[in-house]
Amino acid sequence: MVEKSIIRADEAAAMVRDGAVVHVGGFLGCGSPDMLLAALLASGKSNFTLVCNDTAIYDPKSGRTTGVAPLILGRRFRKVIVSHIGTNPETQRQMHAGELEVELVPQGTLAERIRAAGFGLGGILTPTGVGTEVEQGKQVLEVEGRRFLLELPLPGDVALIKARKADRAGNLVYSKTARNFNPLMATACSLVIAEVEEIVPIGALDPDQIHTPSIFVDYLVLSDGRPEGGSHA
Amino acid sequence: MVEKSIIRADEAAAMVRDGAVVHVGGFLGCGSPDMLLAALLASGKSNFTLVCNDTAIYDPKSGRTTGVAPLILGRRFRKVIVSHIGTNPETQRQMHAGELEVELVPQGTLAERIRAAGFGLGGILTPTGVGTEVEQGKQVLEVEGRRFLLELPLPGDVALIKARKADRAGNLVYSKTARNFNPLMATACSLVIAEVEEIVPIGALDPDQIHTPSIFVDYLVLSDGRPEGGSHA
Amino acid sequence: MPEYVENKEIIARHIARFFRTGHVVNLGIGLPTLVGNYVPPDVTVILQSENGLLGLGPAPAPGEEDKDLTNAGAQPVTLLPGGCFFDSATSFGIIRGGHVDFTVLGVLEVDQEGNLANYKIPGKMVPGMGGAMDLVAGSRHVIAATTHFEKSGASKLKRRCTLPLTAMHEVDYVVTDLGFFEVKEGRFVLNEYFDAYDPAWIIEHTDADIVVAPDCHRWEP
Amino acid sequence: MPEYVENKEIIARHIARFFRTGHVVNLGIGLPTLVGNYVPPDVTVILQSENGLLGLGPAPAPGEEDKDLTNAGAQPVTLLPGGCFFDSATSFGIIRGGHVDFTVLGVLEVDQEGNLANYKIPGKMVPGMGGAMDLVAGSRHVIAATTHFEKSGASKLKRRCTLPLTAMHEVDYVVTDLGFFEVKEGRFVLNEYFDAYDPAWIIEHTDADIVVAPDCHRWEP
């Protein structure tokens, strides 16, 4: 099996061009690639379109942030395509001030749109959003007397994802609810960079138990920033 | 967690009504629930519609069969919805003789149609089959200049599936390429009966490594026919 | 005539009665989460959390939190034995595919057509729908759990929602701190009333069409 | 003038040259499977099998067969270290999503428009398309691997397929035992010819429009 390159977070960030469509894993910060996000912020690049479940958590009182929130505060996005912005008041402020475009997508629809992009579907029909503002501008199809929205694929230029473990081939295993959108995004983007807590030799993972097959992953970054392989244990 | 009933194969077969739409896991017999299929044949019931990857293997010279082939030989199906019948000459014979209706579905489309039924989608758009006979009678949609077929969900009354292991709650783990259509079918049918080689206590399976969550499974049958629980090891 | 005092506990207690052993239930953030506290010990429901788990357990002991194990509100949680994890597509497959028996969620408004609004007050507060649109469209039974009145005193039960809808015609039951309503043929049908709020009082204070069920009665926890 | 002798080996040998380390390749049943034998030792391709694996290895030693580990032709196989298993939806997601670099498959007919027929001879032989329609529609590059002639002597390369199509306009390359063709602008472009079959002979014996590439040359394994 072919080994994947293990790179540093700043090298990963250097591969993301200004204005890219960036998919970021995580659910309110749980399972987000925090080191890659910090490197992306430090890179100074911006004008990105974000595809993510949410804009994570920002508490103005304590200053506490999770996931992509520092990039929101740093105004790195031109547009965000997310299901939820309720835990980041700065996203709402920028939206109302006209500084940030926000496309709200129902969470299950977001998941299927990302999957459709990765799995070569031209779209999916969902009952979710029928009769709501989400219907606006979309084709409505009737199948066996029921109305569905046609939702289109949502591909990306870069996926920044987070996994618990990788082997040197790039097979990934996620941990608990830190899985969420990560495996979907790995299928849907031209360049896939996975931040992982541990890298094990090829053959060390049970082939029945791999969540993301190696062929979806381009580069590995170790969470603690070490540029070279070996276990993080 | 709620425990699932462990029943005998003949009790399982008794739950399948004449004329039911039956999803059967397996790929040319690999990963098919052979004991359930034998019990269904023995039950004498028929007029089923089969949803399966294929009609398995029948070698007229040796008489060897795999998977659903004995039910084809026993003429239990009114119709089969499959991707492949090339390894069962009896299916082809019955089709040409007008004794059996055969709907050929591309394998990837079959997988997505079953998943759509299980996952509440009204359909999916696929490029597969555009410009072929598969297009006939289907809606063709153009998305961003590319043509796609609208393929509709394929739900079933009963899924007869095969897994390597279950816990008492009904969580399932499959083995190698015996996985194939089994986890998809578990989502798409009103009644789901899983034949398994081993049943372990609740808590014995890693919750990150479960292929089919317990809520999809109604009954468990042990492959060696024992009506009561315990390991098959 | 009673004076209205907000009572979230009675709402949670009443909703817990819907569940039977084996039911798969999704409890929304806030008031719906309280419902979990009142499920009788002999009833085993399976709680789904849309961020990717089945078999949600109680909060971990302090110091036992796992950064990789949260609920849809980002709070640390635990997993019960027999539970499992999955990705977001599977999670919403479970939801959209009708494999969740009950979803309980809060509302800004709910109307007698079964419409529900809970994700957006245009120009003011726009949290987003998160998983709510899928949960309401996909679950077998949708229970709106809400205090009967806004702080302004207006009833949250409406003839017609005025806010952007989360879903159309999907709400089956509404449980408030006044009573238990079924949504049926374009009306709220009052089946049970709580505390001192009798049907006449409820009808008088609700800006929607309420029909009193023939067997309507007072319910006490 | 040469006399035609079927030569599957040269087809397999030529196709193996397309691959580079890291390529994901699906080899169809029959002739395409032979291609795996000729991949140079310094090139590591990742073989996909549509029944649910990546990292297909060689056949197991006798007695080492695993009933749960087969290829798409139901033959016992092995998995290489670093390989993995998945369900059929994921398998075809990989295929349809363009994550397979090359699919190599046999044909009944292939035409100069890039159309391919290989799943059905109406009224006679109807094996079904299996995964072929998805593989041809979804893979980045489609290589038709076929002996140049039918047993009847007719060329399998056609102006227009007469049998039901497996896919329309999807074939990129055709490798026969006469030569290597690219499908381009409605023609077969002959890039390389094999053995004693020179371009004139090939054009004379093929019922399709063939253009000879400027740098067309004889290829020897």
Image (cartoon, coloured by chain):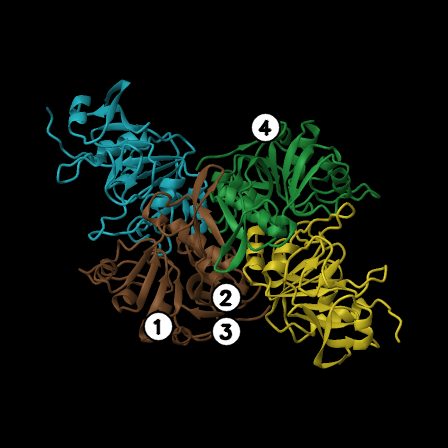
Chain colours: A brown, B green, C cyan, D yellow
Residue B15 marker: 4
Label 4 neighbour load within 10 Å: few <14, some 14-19, many 20+: few
Q: Residue C43 placed where, x, y %?
A: 38, 31
Name the residue rendered at 31%, 74% in the picture: A42
- For label 2, the residue is A217
User: Which tag, 1 or 3, sits closer to the chain's start?
Assistant: 3
- For label 1, the residue is A39
Q: Which of the image's four quarters has the C terminus of chain A? A: bottom left
- Amino acid carrying label 3: it is Ser
| Same-chain check, marks 2 and 4 | no
Query: Residue C184 appears in which quarter of the rendering?
Result: top left
Q: Which of the image's four quarters has the N terminus of chain A? A: bottom right
Q: Is residue C82 visible?
A: no
Say which of marks 3 and 2 sits in front. Answer: 2
- Amino acid carrying label 4: it is Met
Secondary structure under tag 4 reads: loop
Residues at marks 4 and 1, CA–CA distance in whole angstroms:
58 Å
Residues at marks 1 and 2, CA–CA distance in whole angstroms:
19 Å
Compared with residue D42, is residue A175 higher up or lower down, i.e. above or below?
Answer: above
Residues at marks 4 and 3, CA–CA distance in whole angstroms:
53 Å
User: Which tag, 3 or 2, sits closer to the chain's start?
Assistant: 3
Label 2 neighbour load within 10 Å: few <14, some 14-19, many 20+: many
Residues at marks 3 and 2, CA–CA distance in whole angstroms:
10 Å
Compared with residue D67, is residue A19 higher up or lower down, i.e. above or below?
Answer: below
* Horizontal side, residue A24 vs residue A96: left or right: right
Residues at marks 2 and 4, CA–CA distance in whole angstroms:
45 Å
- For label 3, the residue is A5
Pinpoint the chain carrying mark 3.
A
Tell which of A182 and B150 is nearer to you.
Answer: B150
- Amino acid carrying label 1: it is Ala
